[in-house]
Image (cartoon, rainbow, N blue to C red):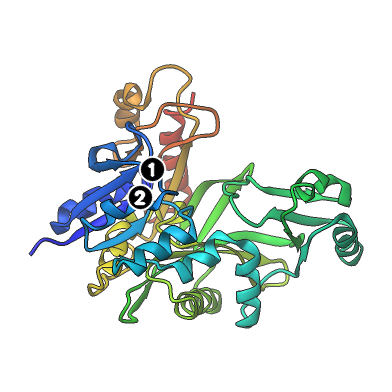
């Protein structure tokens, strides 16, 4: 019997599912918008993911549909389900990854820890929120934001006037005083089995994940237990199937607050490809096919993943292989097949070992080969 998985979206997450699918003998098909995307070697269909007429014929060729991104409209997802197609995660779960206001409402109703927040529709409401929160707030568009886009720190309501003028409600949140950012990845299959990786530390630069340390330093014990409990609760209560990443703030008063959700393999879990018994891409395929989940232990005491942002100023990543491989032979590089562009994630490197300082140095040194 051949297992067939369809992925909507042709980006690097779909690309990184391909080796896992090959190893498991899964037939992976990718629906992409344009030719030449990161996962081009597995693209079987080109079309508009917003158009049911484009997506439905593709979905009928596979056993289950999953996603490289969370932007497929609810009406398309519902049409697939109504046609008897297995969609994982399903529309009900994805709704909370697509709309930050609905996500905050649902998590608050579940009693899960989130920053203080409010729905604001005009400058007066935002001004009131600012007055109640020491004159500063984080304002987010409810939909469409990622990697720092659709997010502003404001000190006056007028600073969000252009967004408010569009007529869509915004999410206003307290400006959290946090010690560091963490991420907890978890996988859940439809039959209910859940598996968690260690909680990791995520280091952000300009709103973009730059580095990940696994496991997060000084996280053993209560912190790790609480992070896992939060992620399990989100996955189970929202009915998530597949991999879920819960991005967290560790506050200065030692609390954990939920920042964002990603219902798919996530940048903060890329370290698992080289650093975990079962990587997040294999686990995602297992989960959406409702197969038993794999072990999530660490291969090394420490793993450090560094994103290659922007890429080289001349040539491409392959041109840098000879020097990078010679200087850091133990560091693994993952090339997303993207052309260099300022700020763009074009790949990542991962190092592992017993000495955290040495592992960080190796990963940063390897990444530097591809960024100058």
Q: In x, y percent, where is residue 307?
A: 46, 41
Q: Classify mark 2: residues with Cα within 10 Å, few (<14), some (14-19) or many (20+).
A: few
Asked whether 49 or 101 is in front, the reply is 49
The Cα atoms of the two marked residues, 2 and 1, are separated by 22 Å
Q: Which quadrant is home to the N terminus? A: bottom left
Residue drawn at 44 percent across, 35 percent down: 367
**Residue 219, image x and y in percent?**
52, 69
N-terminal of the two: label 2 or label 1? 1
17 in relation to 90, above or below? above
* Vertical relation: 76 (above or below) 340: below
Work out which residue is located at the far left of the displayed protein and give it: 1
Circle 1 is placed at which residue position? 11
Q: Is residue 79 above or below residue 52?
A: below
Q: Is residue 93 visible?
A: yes
Residue at x 25%, y 68% (from the top left corner): 289
Q: Quadrant of residue 343?
A: top right
Residue 217 visible within the image: no
Give the crowd class for mark 1: few <14, some 14-19, many >=20 residues within 10 Å: many
| In the foreground, 53 or 133 | 53
Q: Quadrant of residue 222?
A: bottom right
Q: Name the residue that disc number 2 marks.
A: 53
Q: Foreground: 104 or 17?
A: 104
Tell which residue pokes out farthest to the front in this image: 53
Residue 301 pos. (x, y %): 38, 61
Secondary structure at numbered mark 1: loop
> Which residue is rendered at x = 47% and y = 60% of the image?
75
Q: Position of residue 364 (x, y in %)?
A: 47, 39
In the structure shown, which secondary structural element does the residue marked by tag 2 occupy? helix
Whether residue 121 is situated above or below residue 33 in the rendered picture: below
Which mark lies nearer to you, 2 or 1? 2
Q: Is residue 155 left or right of residue 118?
A: right
Say whether residue 27 is left or right of residue 7.
left
């Amino acid at each position: 019997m051949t297992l067939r998985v369809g992925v909507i979206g042709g980006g690097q997450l779909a690309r990184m599912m391909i080796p896992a699918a090959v190893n498991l003998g899964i037939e992976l098909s990718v629906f992409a918008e344009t030719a030449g995307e990161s996962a081009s070697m597995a693209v079987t269909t080109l079309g508009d993911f917003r158009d049911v007429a484009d997506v439905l014929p593709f979905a009928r060729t596979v056993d289950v549909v999953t996603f490289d991104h969370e932007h497929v409209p609810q009406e398309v997802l519902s049409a697939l389900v109504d046609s008897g197609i297995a969609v994982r995660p399903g529309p009900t779960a994805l709704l909370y990854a697509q709309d930050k206001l609905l996500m905050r409402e649902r998590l608050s109703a579940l009693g899960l820890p989130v920053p203080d927040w409010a729905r604001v529709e005009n400058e007066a409401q935002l001004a009131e929120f600012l007055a109640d929160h020491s004159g500063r707030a984080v304002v987010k568009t409810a939909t469409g934001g990622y990697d720092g886009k659709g997010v502003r720190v404001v000190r006056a309501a007028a600073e969000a006037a252009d967004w408010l003028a569009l007529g869509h409600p915004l999410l206003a949140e307290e400006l959290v005083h946090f010690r560091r950012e963490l991420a907890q990845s978890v996988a859940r299959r439809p039959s209910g089995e859940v598996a968690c990786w260690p909680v990791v530390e995520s280091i952000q630069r300009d709103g973009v994940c730059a580095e990940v340390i696994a496991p997060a330093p000084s996280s053993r014990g209560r912190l790790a237990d609480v992070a896992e409990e939060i992620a399990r609760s989100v996955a189970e209560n929202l009915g998530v199937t597949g991999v879920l990443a819960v991005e967290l703030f560790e506050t200065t008063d030692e609390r954990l607050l939920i920042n964002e959700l990603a219902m798919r393999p996530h940048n903060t879990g890329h370290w698992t490809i080289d650093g975990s018994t079962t990587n997040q891409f294999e686990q995602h395929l297992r989960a959406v096919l409702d197969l038993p989940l794999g072990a999530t232990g660490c291969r090394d005491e420490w793993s450090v993943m560094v994103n290659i942002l922007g890429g080289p100023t001349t040539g491409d990543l392959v041109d840098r292989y000879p020097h990078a491989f010679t200087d850091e032979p133990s560091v693994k590089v993952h090339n997303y097949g993207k052309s260099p562009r300022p700020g763009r994630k074009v790949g990542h490197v991962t190092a592992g070992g017993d000495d955290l300082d040495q592992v960080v140095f190796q990963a940063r040194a390897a990444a530097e080969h591809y960024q100058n």
